[in-house]
Amino acid sequence: MSRQTEDRASLEVLDFNARGASAATAQKHYGEALLQAAQADDRIVCLTADLTLPTETDLFRDQLPERFHQVGIAEANMIGIAGGLARSGEIPFVHSFCVFATRRCYDQIAMQVAYPRANVKIVGVIPGLTTLLGVSHQAIDDIALMRALPNMTVIEPSSPDQVRASVAAIARHEGPVYLRLKRADGTEVVGDPASDFTIGKMRVLREGQQGLIVACGMMVYIARSAADALSRDGIEMTVVDMATIKPLDPALVELARRMPLVVTAENHSIIGGLGSAVAEMLMENDVPSKFRRLGVRDTFAEGGTTAFLFEKYGLSANALVATIRQALAQPAP
Amino acid sequence: MNTDTSRERQPAARNRDPADLARIARSLRRHVIALVAPTGQGYVQQGLGAADLFAVLYFAEMRLDPADPQWPDRDRFLLSTAHNTAIFYATLAARGIVERDLVDQYCQDGSVFEVNASERVGTAIEATLGSLGQGLSVGIGMALAARRRGSQSRVYVVLGDGELQEGQLWEAALYAGSAGLSNLCLIIDYNSMQVEGHIDKVVSVAPVAEKFAAFGWAAEEIDGHDIPALLTALEEARGRDRPTCLVATTTAGKGVPSLEGILAHNLKLPAEVAAEAMAALADAEERP
């Protein structure tokens, strides 16, 4: 190796979605859970479209190379291959960024995964407004798209424990799943082991009588922060972690019925995602509460840090607090 | 002696006699006419054109067991242009994989035998295709799974030439060549016809064999009605370390002189044309 190459080999290699050194050393909760599931079930295979490191599938690649398929930059082909593998009895986990794992190959997912109820797990990272790359990499409609597909289960975990538990659960679940994951960046706090996960079951994280916040993914942390802030002023909110967006837990109906206000919070467009799902269920069950949605308001955003984008597009704890205060201040209908 | 019977199972003796296969193809063509004429729905020209390919694949080449449709080591067949179903269903019925009576409900409301073949039919249809460009990718998945199982199962995908205009097909071709999928055999039904007319007047895809060869495949052009040549080409494909692509030139409406060469994507069959077609397709021994 020449002196120059040696020097260059020491340069840090980063991508635009792994910010700072902490991302490089982040614990791979998803990758570890997937490997663990695969070691327990020989049918599990792993596919990636040139995004092995960002999807944490390097662990799988290194441990189970004969079950790892690098398909290159070709997501539509990847979904088709997964459909063929599943019809031959394997359980493919396919990986890409949320945008490319869903929007880019929607018809392929509909025909090769959802319609035949193929046992394929579609795993996307970089949800919503969490990318420096900008609009091309922003997944603000992936929940809406996947939710619209018959037979599809849609899950967005909110914590490392839930990520691990959801991987174990979807590996056991027979049928198509879309798993939407925040990319690990090293800032994750390993939560309490009590944060259990069952597909289709919501978790009530705190209880209060003045309103209900239903959140998923990264917005669960923000919902808790907002509820803490409101609590300091004597406004007590119930906070629900709705990790399974489809099928939505019907227990939400009775919980919401007791609340003067229901607010949904998602790192996604307000159209077609968690807020839409909750609204549909509550309306169809004659729940008369006030209703508000927090999310990206029918617009494309731009590249930026998550904190900046969440503040600018109204996904911050401050925005959630303001939404709740405003709604509570308005006279009931 | 090999005691692994599952590997050697060939439930029905493969018929490799070209004259027999030609007779089978003629009978399949008659069924195509019988299916399409009453409803006016379906793909006559494509079905007549592909009948020799189907006869060779289902009666000579593929290892399958109509009594055990889920036999894991069966060969897989994927019709990526899933709308060419009259010939597909006729073949499945003739091979004893689906019931002829049910096939004859083709296109009736409630029948699982829709214009586009889907998994509604059941295990006889390996995958729901017809949204064009997807079949080769699914075939790759099946070929990879067979390779991991150490199965001798082979995967046969039939594409339409117009389908080569779909980008996903080239993603799949690139991957299959790169992965050296020797248990994958692609047959391009090159009938030169797409919805808007002759393929060269829409978007030319030629030369196809050269394109696949450049992608790492063994590719050759072949007459899609030359049964001995098809038998040989499929036999040779089995011995390779690479995927094989057969560019099979077919004639729309083959077997019915008055229909041959008419590039009509959706051809209706008036009763008198259907009767004329049936007469043209009658076996020599049935002729007066």
Image (spheres, coloured by chain):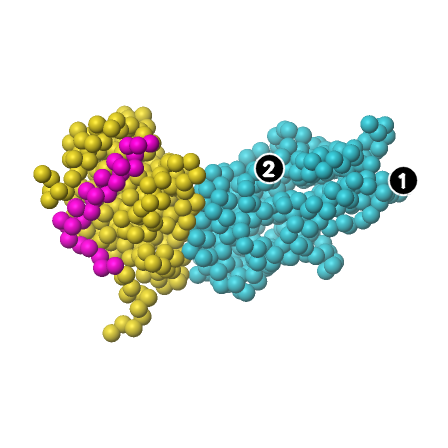
Chain colours: A cyan, B yellow
Task: Name the residue rendered at 32%, 56% in the picture.
Answer: B66
B102 up-or-down from A314: above or below: below
Chain letter, disc 1 residue: A
Asked if badge 1 and badge 2 are on a common chain, one would say: yes
Q: Is residue A136 visible?
A: yes
Task: Name the residue rendered at 62%, 32% in the picture.
Answer: A302
Q: Is residue A26 visible?
A: no
Which element is circle 2 on?
Answer: helix
Please name the predominant secondary structure of the magenta segment in the image: helix
Q: Give, as a three-letter code, the residue at label 2.
A: Ala
Q: Report the span colored magenta.
A: B12-39
Q: Residue furthest right?
A: A234
**Cα separation between marks 1 and 2:** 35 Å
Q: Position of residue B152 (x, y in %)?
A: 32, 61
Residue under label 2: A144
Count of numbered marks: 2
Q: Give, as a three-letter code, the residue at label 1.
A: Asp
Which element is circle 1 on?
Answer: loop
Task: Name the residue rendered at 60%, 43% in the picture.
Answer: A126
Q: Position of residue B74 (x, y in %)?
A: 34, 58
Task: Name the residue rendered at 50%, 58% in the picture.
Answer: A44
Considering depth in this image, is A54 or A67 the residue closer to the camera?
Answer: A67
- Report which quarter residue A28 is drawn in: bottom right
User: Where residue A289 is drawn, which disc sits there?
Assistant: none
Residue under label 1: A233
Q: Is residue A93 magenta?
A: no
Which image quarter holds the C terminus of chain B? top left
Considering depth in this image, is B111 or A160 the residue closer to the camera?
Answer: B111
Q: Residue furthest left?
A: B288
- A280 left or right of A209 in image: left
